[in-house]
Every structure is written in structure tokens, then in C-alpha cells.
Image (cartoon, rainbow, N blue to C red):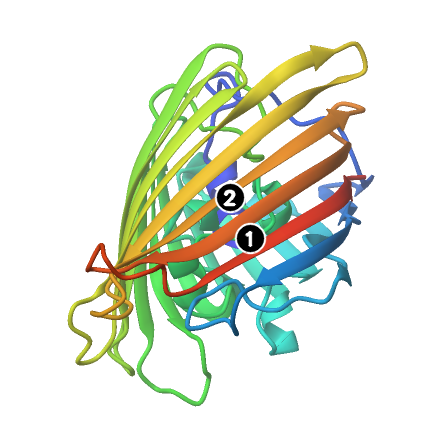
Amino acid sequence: MLVLALALLCIDPAQAQAPAPPPRGLKLSQGAWKAQIDAADLPAGFGVMVQEVAPGSLDLGPRPPLRLSQTAAEIALQGPAGFVVDLRAEDGLLGPDPAHAVEAWAGVALARGSLGLWMGRNDLPVTRDRLRENEELALSWRPLLSTAAGPLNVDGVGLGLAWPGKLTLRGGAAWPDLGEQAPRLWFRGDIHPMGPPPDREDDAVPAFAFRVGGGGFQDRGTGLGLWDADLELRLGPAVLGADWIQLRGTGQEPPLREWILSLGSEILPLANGGISLHLRGERLTGLDPAEGARWLPAGRLAWRGADGAVQIYAESALSFEVPELPALPIARENGLVALGMLARW
């Protein structure tokens, strides 16, 4: 995504603890111009929905049994004076509008990478999961309120400021619907004094690293607003994440609030790769006063080999409600079980 790409231009590689990812894609250069072409991910998955009743609001939605998910192809172009252009098409976990599956932006990094400017169609990284692309997440779907906040890719302009390897500040204005005159104003700040965490959620760091961040947006046209605070701790292959997200619409009382706890690590190193386990739990309140809390436990067990280029996994998620009155039964329970393969090249 563009804002993340500009942030990476602001990082001093000597200070970053996260190891560089293995080389992939086709790299071309001509003078001051450099290009990289990636068929970033070509995964296939087979999933089965286990439904007691029809899904309700923000439930795990129906999905085709055999599907491509977390799929992307990208062309990145770097030119003189910090000029950057990125074109990316993705599929699998986006909304029904095909335009939301496309990123197309142009930007420039100034002041030795401490200042970045951009414009075009891109993601808004206001929550922790939005700092990574779909295929860089440990699970195949994002937290509920991150998804409910609107389309992943929207048209807009943005500004990024950085203290290399220590601090990143980003913000701007976006228009989810170009027919609207009032923009969605957004911001994001991250403190990472020991270098930035790796791009992929399931990657390792040599020692210890952490990131503390938060962000939000206010849609001046619809009154929709989101606020986020989060933390990510890393020790070698282990990662622990915590998030608090609040989403409020016009006249919505109480607001939707989500608490997220995630953890994961490689649990069995092998000569040709390793086996990892990643778990995530979400608790959502405010959806229905009579409903109580919605819980969404999820997890993935995966084998990863070829320097992370190939992954074979089994994952599952469950969505159920805990009513306010303990004597009442659980109102709805739906689940998803999936097998998949992820190839990166």
C-alpha cells in the first residue's frame, strides 16, 4: 500500500531489526529507474461454513467453498528524486465493488525519506491490520470492525512524516465515494524505537522489537467515525498483539467496540521450514443491546517452507453470541473451516 511504502522509504535499514524478506519477483532497472513486478500471492483455499442459522450482522458471511483468497499482483516503479508509482490488483477478501480491489497511486519521498506525499487510490492504515496487505496477515480475514469501517481502497491524498526507524506519522483525506464532497479525514501514528516490525505478520525478528500505535478517521459526510489503539510485541518468531477499536455512526448508541488479542509463533522448526500456530480472539459489544457480546475465536496451523515462499495451512473461525442474561441460550453460532495453500513469488 502506498502509505506503508512511503513509510518504508523513511526507514534506515541499519536500524531496522526486522530482516529483509527473501528476494522475489522480477526486478528491472534502467538508469535512475527501477521496477519490480510481483505475482505476490497465488493461494487457493477450500472452506466449509458450519451454520446453525442464517448469518446476522457482522457474522462470518457465506463464502464459495473453493476460492482464491489473499491474491495479488503488483508493479512498483521507483524513479529519480524519490518518485514512486505503484499499481496493485487483489482479490479474495474485498467488497463487491471491483474498484475497491485496485490500488493505483503516485508519490514522492523528500528530505532523505523523512517526508512523503502521495495521491491516488490506496488503503487507509488506521488500524493495525491495515498496515499490512491481505496476504501479509497471519489469518485469511481481518478483524470485524476493520472490515465494517468501509472499503479497503479509496481515492485520496496523504502526507507521511518519519523519524527513521523510530517514529512514523501519517494522515490525509479520502473520498470512499467520489460523488461525496465531504472527505474522510484520517491519521495514524506509530512508535517503533527498535526498528519496524516485519511486513509479514508471521515473520521473525532477530531479537526483541515492539510497536505502539493508534489512529482513526472521521467521515464528515456520513458522520461515521473510528478510533483505534494497538500494541505489537515481538521476540524472535513469537508475536503478541492487542487492539482496541471503536466504531460510531450517526445516532449510534452505544458505539461498536472491539477488543482483540492475537498471538503466534513457530512451534516446530524443521530442516526445510517450520510449523507455526497463530490464534486471534475478538470480542465485540454494542451490536445489539439484547445480544450482549459477540465472540470470534480463530486460528491457523501452517507449514511454511522455501524461505516463506510456500505455506500450507488449516484454519478455523467461530462466531457466537453471549446473551446478557446467563439463563438464555447462545443465540447464534456459525463457524468456518478451511484448508489452503499460499505461494509467494
Q: Is residue 293 left or right of residue 325?
A: right
**Whole-percent x and y of residue 124?**
43, 59
Residue at 78 percent across and 34 percent down: it is: 24
Q: Pick out the residue farthest to the front.
A: 327
Which label belongs to residue 244?
none
Amino acid carrying mark 2 in the image: Ala
Circle 1/circle 2 CB separation < 8 Å: yes
Amino acid carrying mark 1 in the image: Trp
Q: Nearer the viewer, residue 189 or 233?
A: 233
Count neighbours of disc 2 (C-alpha within 10 A) and say few if under 14, some if 14 to 19, many if 20 or more.
many
**Whole-percent x and y of residue 297?**
45, 44
Residue at 49 percent across and 64 percent down: it is: 119
User: In the displayed structure, would residue 25 be above or below residue 72?
Assistant: above
The residue at which mark 2 appears reads as 298
For residue 90, what is the image quadrant?
A: bottom right
**Whole-percent x and y of residue 31?**
77, 41
Residue at 75 percent across and 62 percent down: it is: 65
